[in-house]
Image (cartoon, grey):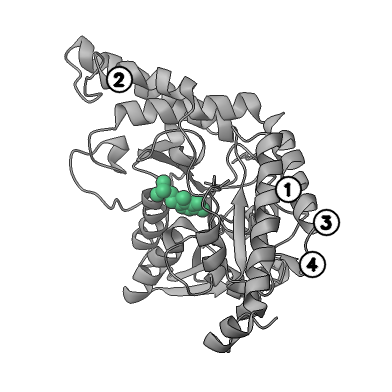
Amino acid sequence: MDHHATTPLDSRVLEAMLPYLTEKFGNPASCTHRYGWDAQAAVEKARKQVAELIGAKAEEIIFTSGATESDNLAIKGVARTNRERSNHIITLAIEHHAVLDSCRRLEQEGFNVTYLPVRADGLLDLAEFENALTGRTILVSVMAANNEIGVIEPIRAIGRVCRDRGVLFHTDAVQAIGKVEINVEAMNIDLLSISAHKIYGPKGAGALYVRQDDPRLKLTPILDGGGHERGFRSGTLNVPGLVGLGKACEICLQEISREPDRLRVLRDRLKDGILSQLEGVHINGSMEQRLPNNLNLSFAGMEAESFLMALKDVAVSSGSACTSATDSPSYVLRALGLPEELALGSVRFGLGRCNTTEEVDFVIDRVVETVKGLRELSFLPEAAAGEPSRGDA
Ligand SMILES: *Cc1c(COP(=O)(O)O)cnc(C)c1O
């Protein structure tokens, strides 16, 4: 139930990858023999598979080591290329750290960054966004869907505004891919980040879509070297990983007409099951503009840290995987204006391809039982005396 952090490798993806880990080991840059040709053909097939899922052309896909690299390359690449004429970037306060920290780095280099707040439901306010655009804005980076609260940002509307104003638009679509239809043409997206391991592919493989109109979008590379990927990203390609990414995208495209609906039914069963048996449960983020597999709940009178320790047989988390070890409240939930007590009692559920109705029912029982147990405990006099500021709800 923690599929926002990562997903298991689909057996069909593994099967596609295996030959490229064994007999087909060639370097796609070796153009003088069969080993290289086979590897190159496999990589070009994967490029088509990725492009097809998002309505792009194969030559617009740059392969990377994952979405962290894609986000870095998109944001730093655009900013550093346009340093002379523009210096302003707009992003969202609830972006993934790969985006936020890239922007922070650029601030150190002299760029101005606007971190737009979100409404209490987690969505960007479009009027506020339009007001933030200036004549010096070069890039807007807004995620398609958030990895903690699953809200789906108004990407299409943002893309239209950016196109009208001549500003480049990047979106981190890691969590949206395979669950929400994304089309870079219809949505006026110029750059888009994808990660294989969030869509049942292998870890360490990703892609960046880079629009190739006329004039071509230029990016200053982060890695220098052999000039692979049209100079955007040097380094020998991770052939098995990219074959896996391509196959994972192909499967997402095949299943996008059914799987999101199945996930929504399971997610709603989970939500209704928990809410019907527990009081004091707060849903974080819009329920309307939301990924079909996400649920983020705050349980009053309970801390997520204790909950996660007590619930050993279900994999859930209190926020993003990167921050799940810290006990400070999530910056995403704080951006929604959630009181600290509720932010500390929040639990993220992310359903996935293998989850079943039986599993959901098991999780409902375990969650209800665990929350009740922790709330009772927090009423015990000795617990209250030990921690006077907590557990008194
Ligand atoms: C997981 C994730 C990333 C990072 O992707 P990696 O491939 O693990 O580097 C970036 N953005 C979002 C929204 C994510 O969920």
At label 4, counting other C-alpha atoms closer than 10 Å, the crowd grade (few under 14, some 14-19, many 20 or more) is few
| Residue position marked by numbered label 2 in the rendering | 20
Q: Which residue: 54% across, 25% down?
A: 250
Which residue is nearer to you in this view: 197 or 48?
Answer: 197
The label on residue 279 is 4
Q: Nearer the viewer, mark 4 or mark 1?
A: 4
At label 3, counting other C-alpha atoms closer than 10 Å, the crowd grade (few under 14, some 14-19, many 20 or more) is few
Q: CA distance from mark 4 to mark 1?
A: 15 Å
Which residue is nearer to you in this view: 361 or 178?
Answer: 361
Q: Nearer the viewer, mark 2 or mark 1?
A: 1
Q: CA distance from mark 3 to mark 4?
A: 8 Å
Q: CA distance from mark 2 to mark 3?
A: 50 Å
| Residue position marked by numbered label 3 in the rendering | 276
Compared with 213, 289 (above or below) is below
| Spot occupied by residue 190 in the image (x, y as percentages of width and height) | 52, 48
Q: Amino acid at mark 4?
A: Glu
At label 1, counting other C-alpha atoms closer than 10 Å, the crowd grade (few under 14, some 14-19, many 20 or more) is many
The yes-or-no answer for disc 4 within 8 Å of ligand 1 is no
Asked if marks 2 and 1 touch (Cβ < 8 Å), the reply is no
Asked whether the viewer can see residue 153, the reply is no
Q: Amino acid at mark 3?
A: Ser
Q: Nearer the viewer, mark 2 or mark 3?
A: 3
Which residue is nearer to you in this view: 249 or 264?
Answer: 264
Q: Amino acid at mark 1?
A: Leu
The label on residue 389 is none
Asked if marks 3 and 4 touch (Cβ < 8 Å), the reply is no
| Residue position marked by numbered label 1 in the rendering | 270
